Amino acid sequence: MIKIGAHMPIGGGFKRVPKETIEIGGNAFQIFPHNPRQWKANLPLSEDALEFKNGIKKYKIEIDSMLCHSGYLINIASPKEEGWKKSLDLLIKEMEICSALGIKYLNIHPGSHLGSGEDEGIKKIVKALNIALDSEKNTFILLENVTKKGGNIGYKIEQLKLIIDNVKQPERLGITIDTCHAWDAGYDIVNKLDEFLEKIDKLIGLEKLKFIHLNDSKNELGSNKDRHENIGMGIIGTDGLKKILTNEIILSKPWILETPGDNEVHKQDIAKVKEILGVI
Ligand SMILES: [Zn+2]
Ligand SMILES: [Zn+2]
């Protein structure tokens, strides 16, 4: 059975997420641990967390199929001390929220060096991760591959490897591969998927690849744009996605849709994926 789901809204409380996941045809999900456009983040109310956990049990959602996605403001690669510290504090708070919800994995964008250069940026990321992993002991951090724009670090697998190799607790780090980001960063995952996966295996190890962010792309290979598109509607397209999704390694990982639209649209996207694979 494939593991699939979408990025789910938390406006109605965390408690609604497990049921809504099942309603859209999923068995996996991703959520923000708080409003991603704010620096403010609170631990979930105990009643909300309890109902959420009960839902997880009731609908039999597996621990390895649940993911939190870090907020947009966090930048642990920042050369500016104040912004870096604020980012680190919020990252730790997000890890605490994950822990309170019983979610093992927190997905982060490695961050932007804002002009200080990749080496400096990676040093700041490693420093922040070491402190964060020491402060909160339950949560695992997944580094997401991104596109090359705005000083972003993590558009190359080599950069993700450098971060993992340099932290003190590499066993608590893993990666998420976003198909749109990989495509936009110039990895031809349609025609050269084996090569791409071999690179991940050689540099990081495929066992560290924990999730796939399954998105079509609005743009051409190597465009560096990062514009997600609904399943089969983008440049990767239905045939391209079929090649990716029928790969045995990809098939063994949970897939999270971050395509445009709400639950109703994601339900259609999940149905489309199942149609592509010929499963009901
Ligand atoms: Zn992301
Ligand atoms: Zn993503």
Image: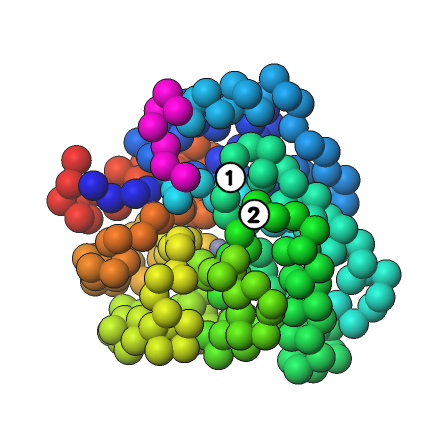
> Which quadrant holds residue 270?
top left
179 or 124: which is nearer to us? Answer: 124
Q: Label 2 neighbourhood size at 10 Å, few (<14), some (14-19), many (20+)?
A: many
Q: Quadrant of the C terminus?
A: top left
User: Could you tell me residue 174's position as x and y percent?
Assistant: 47, 60
Q: Residue at x 86, y 61 (%)?
A: 82
User: Could you tell me residue 6's position as x and y percent?
Assistant: 42, 40
Q: Residue at x 37, y 32 (%)?
A: 61
User: Could you tell me residue 118's position as x and y percent?
Assistant: 65, 80
Q: Residue at x 75, y 68 (%)?
A: 78
Q: Which residues are magenta?
A: 57-63
Q: Which mark is residue 114?
A: none
Most extreme residue toward the right is 82
The disc, 1 or 2, on the residue closer to the chain's N-terminal end is 1
| In the image: residue 67, left or right of residue 188 | right
| In the image: residue 280, left or right of residue 7 | left
Residue at the spot of label 2: 139
User: Could you tell me residue 15's position as x and y percent?
Assistant: 52, 22
Q: Is residue 119 above or below residue 213?
A: below
- Which amino acid type is shown beneath numbered disc 2? Thr
Q: CB of mark 1 within 8 Å of CB of mark 2?
A: yes
Q: How is the image coloured?
A: rainbow
Q: Is residue 114 above or below residue 91?
A: below
Residue 219 seen from this side: no
- Which amino acid type is shown beneath numbered disc 1? Ile
| In the image: residue 186, left or right of residue 165 | left
Residue at the spot of label 1: 103
Give the CA distance from mark 1 to mark 2: 8 Å
Q: Residue at x 49, y 25 (%)?
A: 53
| In the image: residue 3, left or right of residue 32 | left
Q: Label 1 neighbourhood size at 10 Å, few (<14), some (14-19), many (20+)?
A: many
Q: Is residue 34 above or below residue 211?
A: above
